[in-house]
Amino acid sequence: MPEPTTAPATVPAIDLVGVAKRFVSRRGTVTAVERVDLTIGEGEFFSLLGPSGCGKTTTLRMIGGFEEPTEGQILLYGSDVVGVPPNHRDVNMVFQSYALFPHMTVFENVAFGLKRKGVDKAEATRRVNEALELVQLDEKSSRRPRELSGGQQQRVALARALVNRPRALLLDEPLAALDLKLRQAMQLELKRIQREVGITFIFVTHDQNEALTMSDRLVVMNAGRIEQLGSPREVYERPRTRFVAGFIGTSNLLTGIVRSLDGSAAVLEVGADESVVVPEGAAAGARPGQSLDLTVRPEKMRITAGPPDAGWCALRGRVTEVVYLGTSTQYAVDALGGSELLVFSQNASDAEDIASRGQDVWLSWRPEHSLALEPEPAPVAEPELEAAS
Ligand code: ATP
């Protein structure tokens, strides 16, 4: 596995340095963003991912200038923009609600900002046509918004932002209002547009699939903090915390007691007389007798009637549920040690299920797929009321 990509591969476009945001009202103080340090590279498709209330929209709005940080610096290409109004920052924001002018045509909606800026008419027409072509709406330029589908309206909103030629585009859940099929089509479409224009996209979403599909890199946020930063593959394959393991994809969580450390691996006792091997790197700093949480992705586990090959991690259990899902079958297994585990098995052939409900089985996986999780951080004050003054 290559080193985690915590630094962008390109020139830094946006730097957040110790950025925090607290909202103060009569009812008290809400900490929306705790302390965020982040560098986003030029031309990156970068996502802020996390559950509702984790602070991703506030972070995006601070980059756009719609909120000012309580602490820290926001640098756009090296210049601190804290205090600079949104229309003087070289970024544009696309909101979930498209906010198009209903009485204007598609062309007029896209041209609106340029007209206000006093851009020459011929130049504006050329730029609007270029933007509409990019979002594949050049043939619908004389329609009104109500004559367009949701996806087409979202493209108009996108063209309206791109026509200003910002250095970065900030997108706040822009696909949330679309149905699943359209949302998936628009994800690919957005990726294509971003590649063509080559500008930085910062995308806010609570949908892990969306973030994995589209991003070059992403952060997973939780309660105002960044829990993990990396490429989609790194964050999925190497979740560092219980929160990330649970938020992105499905994870099996196991807790074991470190029994021995032999220099290259740690052996964990996870149940009756069962043990699991964790590569030493993954259990760095662990001591015998210590409890360690680990995670194994369901698709990395194998299910067999007999014990696995030597060198594999193994657990015994009983199948409690078998769900056929077409491309794969999902098995729920109660492990002897008490954990409830899931196994996803690809249906490469149309043979029968590899195990049936009530059957005693072995679950096995390669040691490198045992991922030790960092201990849970001290509980963070919910971004709710902290102290009423
Ligand atoms: P969602 O996906 O629901 O939009 P989010 O991750 O984008 O969530 P934020 O909108 O950034 O979260 O909000 C983070 C926290 O800050 C929440 O607890 C929210 O209630 C609070 N918050 C956001 N804006 C304000 C405000 N203007 N005044 C007071 N509290 C606010």
Image: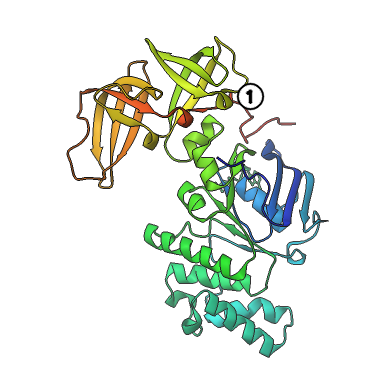
Of all residues, the one furthest to the front in this rendering is 310
Observer able to see residue 61: yes
Q: Position of residue 132 (x, y in %)?
A: 54, 78
Which color scheme does this rendered protein use? rainbow
The three-letter code of the residue at mark 1 reads Ala
State which quadrant residue 313 falls in: top left
Check the image and report above or below for 37 versus 369. below
Q: Quick one: label 1, few (<14), some, or many (20+) residues within 10 Å?
A: few
Identity of the residue drawn at 67% across and 90% down: 122
Check the image and report above or below for 90 versus 269. below
- Circle 1 sits on which residue? 378
Side of 68 relative to 232 (left or right) = right
Identity of the residue drawn at 42% across and 34% down: 297
Q: Quadrant of the N terminus?
A: top right
Q: Quadrant of the C terminus?
A: top right
Q: Point out the quarter of the image occupied by ligand 1.
A: top right
